[in-house]
Amino acid sequence: MNLTQYVDQLRQELAVAAEAGGDEARALAERLTAPLESAARLTLLNALSAAADEITVDLAPGSVDVRLRGLDPEFVVTPPPAGEPFDAQAEYAALMA
């Protein structure tokens, strides 16, 4: 999954907001752009990981993982094993007992 488009969109929104603040705000926004890119990528990766965890709960005993290759994450889906249908509600009830 290419995160660049989302990071670029955030950068553009920051530039638009800085335009309203004048020259000093514009200069500050330019200085913040590089560190903001790393922080934005990390935050997006954390959100994607949390989403994968939520999907895994519904997919159990299968799973969804997020792996990082270079700068971009990719999803890896492990389907549940073939055989008996899995009853997620029964499994959850057993765990809570």
Image (tube, rainbow, N blue to C red):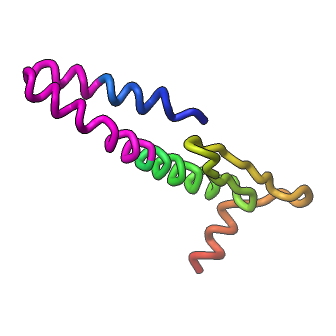
Q: Residue furthest bottom?
A: 97
Q: Per the image, is 24 magenta?
A: yes
Q: Quadrant of the N terminus?
A: top right
Kindly indicate the quadrant of the structure image that contains residue 82.
Answer: bottom right
**Horizontal and vertical percent for residue 27?**
16, 29
User: What predominant SS class does the magenta segment belong to?
Assistant: helix
> 49 or 63: which is nearer to us?
49
Image x and y of residue 33, in percent? 30, 35
Whether residue 22 appears in magenta in the rendering, the answer is yes
Q: As drawn, is 20 to the left or to the right of 10?
A: left
> What is the x, y in percent for residue 9?
38, 25
Residue ID at (52%, 47%): 48
The answer to whether residue 89 is above or below residue 42 is below
Q: Which residues are magenta?
A: 13-41
Q: Residue at x 9, y 22 (%)?
A: 23
Which residue appears at 32% of the width and 23% of the height? 12
Q: Is 19 on the left or on the right of 34, as rendered?
A: left
Nearest the viewer among 57 and 77 is 77
Tell me: 76 left or right of 66: right
Q: Position of residue 21 (x, y in %)?
A: 8, 24
Query: Residue at point 57% right, 76% down?
Result: 96
